[in-house]
Image: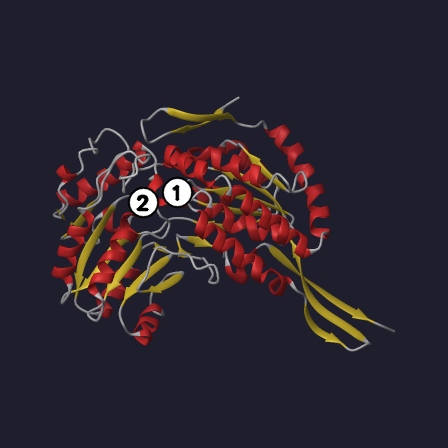
């Protein structure tokens, strides 16, 4: 039996390990989950909402422990307090809109005919969650999935093994089988999808992982939602509030050691602001403190693994060899020895789109900054990418932001903010970022199917 192991980025030791579950035992669990789902869906909506809300509050009560566990598992500094506030906000919004979103749409009801469109749960929803925001990304599907009447099966990333267990404990008060946490290897995961064990698969992760999910599901007609890679751009126009742009974009690029789905990975600045932007950004990045995420003064923890850090090191080295100029003094960050997951932040100028660091996902603490002449050049550069999750525009003109946004190939357009998910708006992407929708009322539509009723009285 294979082991699923979490190697902590703090010191490279094995921090948690669990045996992968054999496929025969998993099939039995899924059979029980299907039976439980029918009874769960039959319960009144307000009861399901209340029970899901209780699960969120049960999780909140152990948040102190969760924050420390996250530092050990994936390196986020404890000073940031985990994911509880946005998690509660997202859950609360989905609870709030559940009744009106899931209510039947009546077309006719006049005594002779009753015609309406209803929404039914899909059945068994499989959530394959990532390690970078391990609670938030999972909750995006778990909460609406359960509220809509589905049974939910969670497989968490090996890097965040204990998150799946914490979520299972939080929802342990639900009827048995309605929520399950499974420890699976890749082969078992693919086999289960291929044999149509689930009615919907939600995956957040790499493009390669998304391709493997789609291959496994091919021919099964199983619904698949994918949030994959990103290379999210920002554009600072000539009319931008420079101080706000620098502060927010630096945070958007380096928070969580740059390991954010919608983190800022490339910045385009109008030539009239470029020199001042770069000067202020260098000053801001130089203030980070790289170190042990368990220490309160640490503002930049290690990346989740040495392998991820080495990928970013390689991109930076290639860019510098091709003419890019690094502006952050590595001597400010002695914790970065080049031998482990601790990686100093870096800001690059003199970059261009021939460099991997400007075209391929970095998912680490590096950002390239380019000077642009006008909106047209910025739009062309923002669209010159295989990904499209979010784009951040910095301007004081609502109309201009909307006009530029309409020309950007992306799932979300931000004006004067970045690295954020608004639960009232759809979270979606284009191109290699994936397909499908989560959050907002569309999140419920992704986790239910329409059913038409045409009732006639003779």
Pointer 1 with pointer 2, Cβ within 8 A: yes
Left or right position of 138 against 308: right
Front position in the image: 162 or 159: 162
* Residue 363, label in figure: 2
Q: Residues within 10 Å of mark 2 (few under 14, many from 20)?
A: many
Which residue is found at the position 33% from the left and 58% from the top?
A: 418
In the picture as drawn, the residue positioned furthest to the top comes out as 1
Which quarter of the rendering shows the C terminus? bottom right
Q: Position of residue 275 (x, y in %)?
A: 11, 60
Front position in the image: 213 or 19: 19
Q: Position of residue 448 (x, y in %)?
A: 62, 56
Residue 372 visible in the displayed image: yes
- Which residue bears the numbered disc 1? 132
Left or right position of 371 against 292: left
Dividing the picture into quadrants, the one containing residue 409 is bottom left
In the picture as drawn, the residue positioned furthest to the right comes out as 458
Residue 221 visible in the displayed image: no
Name above or below for residue 237 compared with residue 50.
below
* Residue 451, label in figure: none
């Amino acid at each position: 039996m294979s082991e699923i192991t979490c190697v902590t980025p703090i010191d490279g030791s094995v921090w948690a390990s669990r045996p992968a579950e054999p496929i025969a035992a998993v099939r039995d669990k899924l059979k029980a989950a299907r039976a439980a789902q029918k009874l769960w869906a039959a319960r009144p909506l307000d009861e399901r909402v209340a029970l899901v809300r209780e699960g969120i509050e049960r999780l909140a009560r152990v948040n102190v422990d969760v924050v420390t566990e996250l530092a050990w598992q994936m390196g986020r500094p404890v000073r940031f307090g985990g994911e509880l506030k946005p998690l509660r906000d997202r859950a609360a919004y989905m609870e709030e809109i559940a009744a009106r979103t899931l209510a039947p749409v009546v077309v006719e009801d006049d005594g002779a005919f009753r015609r309406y469109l209803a929404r039914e749960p899909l059945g068994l929803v499989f959530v394959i969650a990532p390690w970078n925001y391990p609670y938030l990304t999972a909750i995006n599907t778990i909460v609406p999935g359960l509220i809509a009447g589905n049974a939910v099966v969670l497989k968490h990333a090996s890097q965040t093994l204990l998150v799946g267990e914490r979520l299972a404990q939080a929802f342990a008060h639900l009827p048995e089988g309605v929520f399950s946490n499974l420890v699976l290897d890749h082969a078992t995961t693919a086999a289960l999808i291929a044999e149509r064990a689930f009615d919907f698969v939600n995956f957040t992760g790499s493009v390669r992982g998304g391709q493997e999910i789609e291959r496994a599901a091919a021919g099964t007609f199983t619904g698949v939602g994918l949030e994959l890679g990103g290379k999210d751009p920002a554009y600072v126009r000539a009319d931008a509030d420079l101080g706000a742009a620098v502060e927010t974009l630096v945070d958007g690029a380096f928070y969580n050691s740059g390991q954010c789905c919608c983190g800022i990975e490339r910045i385009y600045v109008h030539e009239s602001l470029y020199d001042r932007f770069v000067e202020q950004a260098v000053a801001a990045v130089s203030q980070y403190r790289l170190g042990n995420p368990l220490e309160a003064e640490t503002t930049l923890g290690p990346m989740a693994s040495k392998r991820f850090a080495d990928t970013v090191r390689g991109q930076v080295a290639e860019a510098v060899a091709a003419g890019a100029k690094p502006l952050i003094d590595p001597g400010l960050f002695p914790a970065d020895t080049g031998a482990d997951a601790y990686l100093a932040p870096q800001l690059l100028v003199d970059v261009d789109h021939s460099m991997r660091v400007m075209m391929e996902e970095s998912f680490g603490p590096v950002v390239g900054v380019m000077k642009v002449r006008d909106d047209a050049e910025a739009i062309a550069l923002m669209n010159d990418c295989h990904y499209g999750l979010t784009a951040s525009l910095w301007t004081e003109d609502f109309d201009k932001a909307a006009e530029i946004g309409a020309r950007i190939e992306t799932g979300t357009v931000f004006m004067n903010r970045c690295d954020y998910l608004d639960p009232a708006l759809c979270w979606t992407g284009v191109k290699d970022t994936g397909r499908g929708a989560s959050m907002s009322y569309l999140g419920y539509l992704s986790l239910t199917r329409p059913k038409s009723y045409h009732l006639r009285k003779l």
